[in-house]
Image: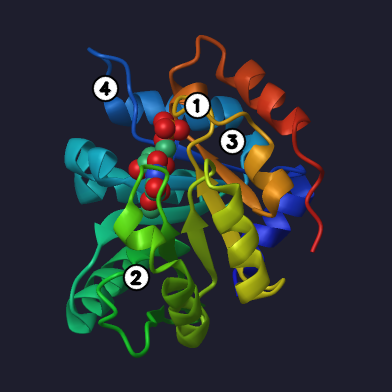
Amino acid sequence: MPSKLKKIAVEKRSRVVLALDYYPHGRDPLDFWSSLLSDVGDLVAGVKVGLPALLSVGTEGLRELVESFSGDVYFIADFKLADIEDIVRSVAQSVLGMGFDGVIVHLFPLCYSRLSAREGGRSLDFYGVASMSCPSTLMDAHLDELLDYAVKLGLAGVVVGANKPGAIRRARERLGSQALILSPGVGAQGVEPGAAVAAGADFEIVGRAVAASPSPRAALERIMKSHPPPGW
Ligand code: O7M
């Protein structure tokens, strides 16, 4: 279970996972995200890094970013993994080697029997996408199956769109209190801060509303005011 994420969240009283996808045109992305994390790292529990970051700064750039801040934040790799189990496990092992704490995988392939990655004394937390913030009717029609699959795999948590409070409530019912629910869609995609947490999510994943704000700290403080303090 993702005890590092919970511990950091409680210490910082933060339910925010910051998505690092956006950087201003003309800026060096690694320099921008390093400055952003220096500015607001004390306000975020987790940082989600996706393909835009990987493709713009490369694995060495990401390794550097993770190494610089991993004492203070929980790093989640979101490389849109949806493949056969051997490939997912191999990527997960590399992700752990880069210093990440968690990885997000798509559940819809239903290809996995056991997901794990270990190295030395460290292990990676796995999160599964159960419902998206876009109108993905195919996935939503199979929500219960995807949630039950997440439980069967013993995942650390699931991703459920912040614009789908019914799906968040359903996820909480089916997952129980231990697994985490991470909800994207807040801010730039139109969901009010606090709505997903009010429906039962543990964390709200926020990208542009913070990273593209002229005052990322003030934007984060506004979002955090809408959340009850975390406690598990
Ligand atoms: O706050 P934003 O809109 O700038 O960023 C949202 C982030 O959440 C961005 O990194 C997306 O890839 C991610 N996300 C969604 O927006 N919707 C989803 O359904 C799922 C994700 C996600 O994180 O998938 C793992």
Disc 4 element? loop
> Mark 1, mark 3: which one is toward the viewer?
1
Gap in angstroms between the C-alphas marked 4 and 3: 19 Å
Spatial separation of the CA atoms under disc 1 and disc 3: 24 Å
Q: Which mark is residue 180?
A: none
Q: Give the residue type that dot 2 points to.
A: Leu
Q: Nearer the viewer, residue 73 or 166?
A: 166
Q: Are marks 4 and 2 in contact (CB under 8 Å)?
A: no
**Cβ atoms at labels 1 and 3 below 8 Å apart:** no
Residue at left offset 68%, top offset 75%:
176
View quadrant of ligand 1: top left
Judge the density around disc 1: few (<14), some (14-19), many (≥20) Cα neighbours within 10 Å: few
Question: Which of marks 1 and 2 precedes in the sequence?
Answer: 2
The amino acid beneath tag 4 is: Asp
Quadrant where the image shows the C terminus: bottom right
| Residue that carries the numbered disc 3 in the rendered image | 41
Q: Where is 210 relative to 152, above or below?
A: above
Instruction: Tell me residue 163's x, y (percent).
Output: 52, 41
Q: Which residue carries the number 2 mark?
A: 107
Specify whether 86 is left or right of 155.
Answer: left
Considering only order in the chain, which callout, 3 or 4, is on the residue closer to the N terminus?
A: 4
> Which amino acid is tagged 1?
Gly
Residue beneath label 1, please?
A: 190
Q: Earlier in the sequence, mark 4 or mark 2?
A: 4
User: Do the CB atoms of the residues marked 4 and 3 lie less than 8 Å apart?
Assistant: no
Q: Is residue 10 left or right of residue 140?
A: right
- Residue located beneath label 4 in the image: 28
Q: Residues within 10 Å of mark 3 (few under 14, many from 20)?
A: some
Instruction: Decide which of tag 1 and tag 3 comes sooner along the chain.
Output: 3
Locate residue 208: give its quadrant: top left
